[in-house]
Image (cartoon, rainbow, N blue to C red):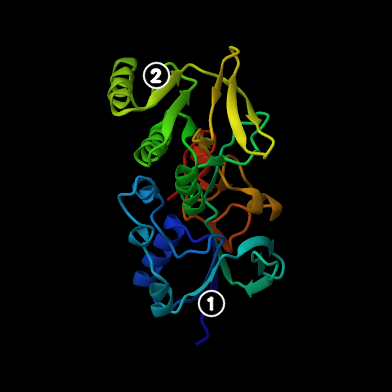
Amino acid sequence: MKKSKLVMVGNGMAGVRTIEELLKIAPDLYDITVFGAEPHPNYNRILLSPVLAGEQTLDEIVLNSWDWYKDNHITLHAGKKVVEVDRVHRIVRAVDSEGGVTEEKYDRLLMCTGSNPFILPVPGKDLQGVIAYHDIADTNAMIEASEKYKKAVVIGGGLLGLEAANGLMLRGMEVTVVHVMPWLMERQLDDVAGKLLQKSLEDRGLKFMIGAQTQELTGGDDGRVKSIKFKDGTELETDLVVMAVGIRPNTELAEKMRLHCNRGIVVTDTLQTVTDARIYSVGECACAPRHCLRPGRSVV
């Protein structure tokens, strides 16, 4: 009997875990194809911070090796970003870095497009040396910057921002954390605990600007960021700016496909999209109707 064709858009943790469970339950049900925009197999994004800090290597955080896909008869198109889905003819189209096009037909489609880091909409956000902290490419960019430059600013005093700051400090950079709120990790800690955390991190060598509001990033003649200006008129020199100020569900492709989105791709309790019963979604890009009015809720 001919297998149904399952195509998954996105090669992240939530999507591949879904495939793992599906293989346990019904290993012969689907012919599976996976598209991943990054040129890597599935890896543990949570462990990027130990990689930045030099405590682990990229190879050590891989969850599913190239051989895993081969052994499970899964076709992996790594380094190919899906740019279009024809829902009428059920065709997925992706492009690689050289502009080559790959097409796959599907019977069932699994949308696992994850999230995008939020970038502050300030002048200078597109300068060289201004990055987010979301994937292997960002981690490698920070490691390379630490080998050439001395000063770094991390915007965002949440957990991710503090992990980025610690990793850059361990690689020898002079790091200042800029946080607009009155204390660090305000969603997890009260003011007393937040200030105790700040004192502990200051003792380790980190610097902080609490309550500072970023107004502009300025660049040099070479097009690289050279300073950050604040709304109170102060200015801080820097060679690298890392923005760790939150994430947003990546619904760009879903919206292009005319799937219903509301703070995420809206799905039912069976993870089917409410727009198209042939299409499912899991992970940070997905949202159940009862959660769609609450930011930051995803379906995993």
Quarter location, residue 232: top right
N-term-proximal mark, 1 vs 2:
1
Circle 2 SS class:
loop
Observer-nearest of 174 and 233:
174
Q: Are marks 1 and 2 in contact (CB under 8 Å)?
A: no
Mark 1 → mark 2, Cα distance in angstroms: 53 Å
Mark sitting on residue 276? none
Residue at mark 2 = 183
Residue shown at 69% from the left, 36% from the top? 221
Image: 279 above or below 240: below
Picture coordinates of residue 168 (x, y %)?
A: 40, 39
Picture coordinates of residue 231 (x, y %)?
A: 60, 15
Circle 1 SS class:
strand
Mark 1, other Cα within 10 Å: few <14 / some 14–19 / many ≥20: some
Image: 9 above or below 27: above
**Can residue 72 be seen from the camera position used here?**
yes
Closer to the camera: disc 1 or disc 2? 2
Q: What's under tag 1, amino acid-wise?
A: Ser
Q: What's under tag 2, amino acid-wise?
A: Trp
Observer-nearest of 285 and 239:
239
Residue most extreme to the top = 232
Residue shown at 54% from the left, 22% from the top? 236
Residue at mark 1 = 4
Observer-nearest of 250 and 237:
237
